[in-house]
Image (cartoon, rainbow, N blue to C red):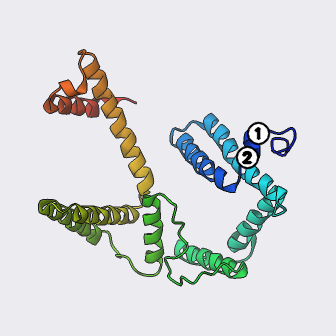
Amino acid sequence: MAQLRHPETGCAWDLKQSFSSLAPYAIEEAYEVADAIERNDLDDLRLELGDLLLQVVFHSQIAQEQGLFDFEQVAEAISEKMISRHPHVFGDTVYNSDEERQKAWDEAKEKEKLAQGKVTKDKSVLAGVPVNLPALIECEKIQDKAANHGFDWPEVEPVFDKVMEELEEVKEAWEEKDQAHIQEEMGDLLLVSVNLARHLKVNPEVALKQATKKFSKRFNYIEEQVELTDRNLRDCELAELDAFWDEAKRILKETP
């Protein structure tokens, strides 16, 4: 990377990059790592982890050029953090439950912020969640923070009731033909759905990703069947497409 960034013999593209211009690539590479894991393509995972590591090296090289820090200091910082946050592994501390361990982890993070002078004016327990996270992940993290401070249903049954309540409110807003109200109520429905996923120990981001992938496979099957008849999708009645959908559900479920 030092050679790629060399002002005289380096690559023109690499020389033009900055922390800001590279930020989207780090996010993209992280998603590609997750995709390789989901596909269980371990060889691709090795390659994608390399791409993600490159982003760390790239940022570190730019920082080194500016006299800020280098890659060695990045690695040292995360090592120190992992040691300090795992006193039950690197020390004599004993936690009696996951809840106790999680509480200690959160307290350690707050102490780190204090030591680094990163305490913000926002004293809310919800503070600290990055605003640029995907909406589904942000929602889950916000709810986790609230739950860690006692604002959560102790059992899952009331959450099912709340989902049905919010669904009914979406329908009422739709009947009113008020688009702004419909959007508001849809947001409430999605939020409580994330809460239900939390209570059921399901990662909502992963669940939605899997459902979208399943939808795409079934829709592709419909396209294939329609293509066999030399027609386009718009040439078919909805009832026929629904029949292909049901067929796709049965066949693809049986396919290993």
Residue furthest toward the left?
175
Residue 236, how many percent across, how many down?
Answer: 17, 26
Left or right: residue 123 versus residue 179 is right
Q: Is residue 108 visible?
A: yes
Residue 223, how many percent across, how many down?
Answer: 30, 26
Q: Answer with the quarter of the image where residue 93 lies.
A: bottom right
Which residue is at a point 71% across and 53% down the rendered structure image? 18
Q: Residues within 10 Å of mark 2 (few under 14, many from 20)?
A: few
Query: Which one is nearer the viewer's eye here, 232 or 101?
Result: 232
Which residue is at a point 56% across and 40% down the rendered structure image? 36
Relative to residue 45, is residue 100 depicted above or below? below
According to the picture, the residue beneath numbered tag 2 turns out to be 16
Which residue is at a point 27% across and 34% down the rendered structure image? 249
Disc 1 residue type (three-letter)? Ala
In the rendered view of the protein, which quadrant contains the C terminus?
top left
Q: Secondary structure at mark 1?
A: helix
**Are the residues at dot 1 and dot 2 in contact (C-beta closer than 8 Å)?**
yes
Q: Residues within 10 Å of mark 1 (few under 14, many from 20)?
A: few
Disc 2 residue type (three-letter)? Lys
Which residue is at a point 44% across and 76% down the rendered structure image? 146
Q: Which mark is residue 229?
A: none
Residue 136, how many percent across, how many down?
Answer: 42, 59
Q: How many marks?
A: 2
Q: Answer with the quarter of the image where residue 194 lies.
A: bottom left
Left or right: residue 110 versus residue 240 is right
Q: Is residue 94 visible?
A: no
Q: Answer with the quarter of the image where residue 98 lies.
A: bottom right
Q: Which mark is residue 12?
A: 1
